[in-house]
Image: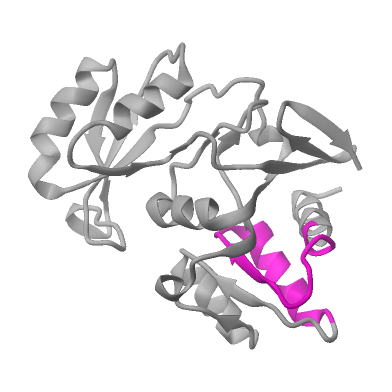
């Protein structure tokens, strides 16, 4: 089975648990793109969508799906998203997209925040092979750099070859990638990073995800709190 087929099967499994007449959150990535197409093809299916991703929003609109303004929504029935890695306690790390602040908001607003991943992105404990991303107030850059260094992190401002200067989030703030060699207490790290004045939010998700659907060559399994896996 190809990686694309695995992602399609994962999206079909996600589709099966979406109630009709519900408000759902959709993140970004190829599995979410497959899910959007399956939603469009399902007959008599009336749902509304909230998304932090400009690309997902455009794809939804191109497929005739209704997208709500997030600022007008105070509750989401369930949300689906991807991540760079998720562990047995449903801690997750998201580094690439730089939209984690809005993703975390949507995850917190949702009754269920479900991560859709392939088995290569699961680890018993987060390995921090990719950096934690901080969205930061510009005035706090030097202060935040000093604080994360005190926590053992190696900060680097995100840049892009396609843009001069720092990479700026959709909210208008710079992004700082912070690498950690070893993390002994994920929850404490999350609390310490969140406590830095000027940090708007981090890409480390602790107590946000409620489930993960892990897809692989041998099928799919659900990862649920408290650390209970259910085979599908």
Q: How is the image coloured?
A: one colour
Residue 31 drawn at (x, y percent): 68, 58
Q: Is residue 182 above or below residue 27?
A: above
What residue is drawn where x is 8% and y is 46%? 139
> Observer-nearest residue: 115 or 206?
206
Specify the quadrant of the image occupied by residue 157: top left
Q: Residue at x 68, y 34 (%)?
A: 120
Residue 70 or 5: which is nearer the viewer? 70
- Asked where in the image residue 21 lies, by quadrant, the reply is bottom right
Which x, y percent locates residue 213?
A: 75, 44
Quarter of the image with the C terminus is top right
Q: Nearer the viewer, residue 93 or 156?
A: 93
Q: Is residue 82 left or right of residue 154?
A: right
Q: How many marks?
A: 0
In the image, 91: left or right of 101? right
216 lies above or below 180:
below
Where does the magenta region start and end?
A: 14-42
Position of residue 28 measured from the top left corner of the image (x, y, whole percent)? 55, 60
47 horizontally vs 16: left or right: left
On screen, residue 19 above or below 228: below
Image quarter for residue 132? Answer: top left
Q: Is residue 36 magenta?
A: yes
Q: Residue at x 54, y 52 (%)?
A: 107
Residue occupying image coordinates x 60% and y 20%: 125
Answer whether residue 156 is magenta in the image.
Answer: no
- Give the x, y percent position of residue 149: 21, 20
Q: Please determine whether, in this image, residue 122 is positioned above or below residue 150.
A: below
């Amino acid at each position: 089975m190809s990686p694309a087929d695995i992602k399609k099967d994962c999206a079909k499994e996600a589709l099966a648990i979406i109630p009709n007449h519900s408000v759902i959150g959709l993140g970004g990535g190829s599995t979410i793109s497959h899910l959007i197409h399956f939603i469009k093809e399902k007959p008599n299916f009336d749902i509304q969508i909230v998304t932090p991703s400009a690309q997902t929003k455009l794809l939804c609109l191109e497929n005739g799906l209704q997208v709500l303004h997030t600022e007008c929504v105070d509750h989401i029935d369930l949300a689906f998203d991807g991540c760079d890695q998720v562990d047995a306690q449903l801690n997750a790390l998201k580094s690439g997209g730089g939209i984690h602040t809005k993703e975390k908001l949507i995850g917190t607003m949702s009754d269920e925040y479900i991560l859709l991943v392939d088995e290569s992105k699961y680890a018993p404990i987060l390995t921090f092979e990719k950096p934690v991303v901080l969205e930061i107030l510009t005035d706090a850059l030097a202060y935040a750099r000093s604080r994360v260094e005190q926590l053992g992190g190696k900060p680097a401002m995100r840049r892009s070859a396609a843009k001069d200067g720092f990479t700026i989030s959709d909210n208008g703030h710079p992004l700082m990638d912070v690498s950690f060699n070893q993390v002994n207490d994920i929850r404490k790290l999350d609390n310490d990073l969140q406590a830095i004045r000027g940090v708007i939010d981090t890409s480390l998700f602790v107590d946000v995800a409620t489930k993960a659907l892990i897809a692989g060559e041998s099928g799919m399994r659900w990862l649920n709190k408290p650390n209970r896996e259910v085979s599908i």
